[in-house]
Amino acid sequence: MKKAPSGSNGHIDWIECRGRSLFELRRADLERHDLKGVWLTPGLIDCHTHLIFAGTRAREYAERLRGASYAEIAARGGGILTTMRATRQASLEELVNGAAARLTALLAEGVTTIEIKSGYGLTLADEAKMLRAARQLGERFPITVKTTLLAAHTLPPEFASRADEYIDTIAREWLPALRAEGLVDAVDIFCERIPSMCIRRAAL
């Protein structure tokens, strides 16, 4: 590997497996590093993650393996709502620490930029808590973090059978408040196919 001189801000300028190229002959001033056969790749981008959450749905996964459908589990208050309850109960510090372990694994695989969605809080305070956790991860780790507000993930219990009102609340109240705090880079909406949970309007 040939590393560009200081005029190029220390970026890798050229990678070559063997032999001398015309590039090398033209740029004899390059700093060289023998990486002894390791794999070099551009930084990876993980553009869709739910990195921040609390709790586990392991028991529900076991039910799925035994034949239960996701709709059946959701009708009993499981699925996303299971994670919602645990995430609401978790502190900001607990969310950051739990996600840090997952982020460390991604860093080891070469991820340098990551999108992190909210969507398990489903209240303004809890969505903000998730997004603050994402921002803290971006400050603590050598990675670029982009945040996405996914409050329209499913209908929370407080808005049961009031999907339109929930979307209006997100659009008119939550999104402006979260943007003002600098917590939101993008917005995502997911329309669950389970009729009782479906958010019918999908335009913010």
Image (cartoon, grey):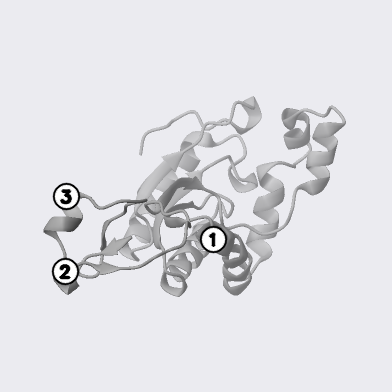
The kind of residue on which mark 1 rests is: Ala
The crowd level at tag 2 (other Cα within 10 Å; few <14, some 14-19, many 20+) is: few
| Count of numbered circles in the view | 3
Does residue 192 sit above or below 114 in this rendering?
Answer: above
The kind of residue on which mark 2 rests is: Asp
Q: Secondary structure at mark 3?
A: helix
- The quarter of the picture where the N terminus appears is bottom left
Q: Is residue 75 left or right of residue 131?
A: right
Residue drawn where x is 12% and y is 57% of the image = 26
Q: Position of residue 90 (x, y in %)?
A: 66, 66
Could you give the CA–CA distance between mark 3 and mark 2, rounded to whole angstroms?
Answer: 13 Å
Q: Which residue is mark 1?
A: 108
Q: Position of residue 150 (x, y in %)?
A: 48, 46
Question: Can you tell which quarter of the image residue 92 is in?
Answer: bottom right
Taking depth in this image into account, of 8 and 55 the one nearest to the observer is 8
Mark sitting earlier along the chain (3/2): 3
The crowd level at tag 1 (other Cα within 10 Å; few <14, some 14-19, many 20+) is: few
Taking depth in this image into account, of 86 and 64 the one nearest to the observer is 64
Q: Position of residue 176 (x, y in %)?
A: 33, 55
- Which mark lies nearer to you, 1 or 3? 3
Does residue 7 sit above or below 63 in this rendering?
Answer: below
Mark sitting earlier along the chain (1/3): 3
Q: Secondary structure at mark 1?
A: helix
Residue 29 is tagged as 2
Whether pointer 3 and pointer 2 mark residues with C-beta atoms closer than 8 Å, the reply is no
Q: Is residue 179 left or right of residue 55?
A: left
Q: Which residue is mark 3?
A: 22
Q: Secondary structure at mark 2?
A: loop
Could you give the CA–CA distance between mark 1 and mark 3, rounded to whole angstroms?
Answer: 34 Å
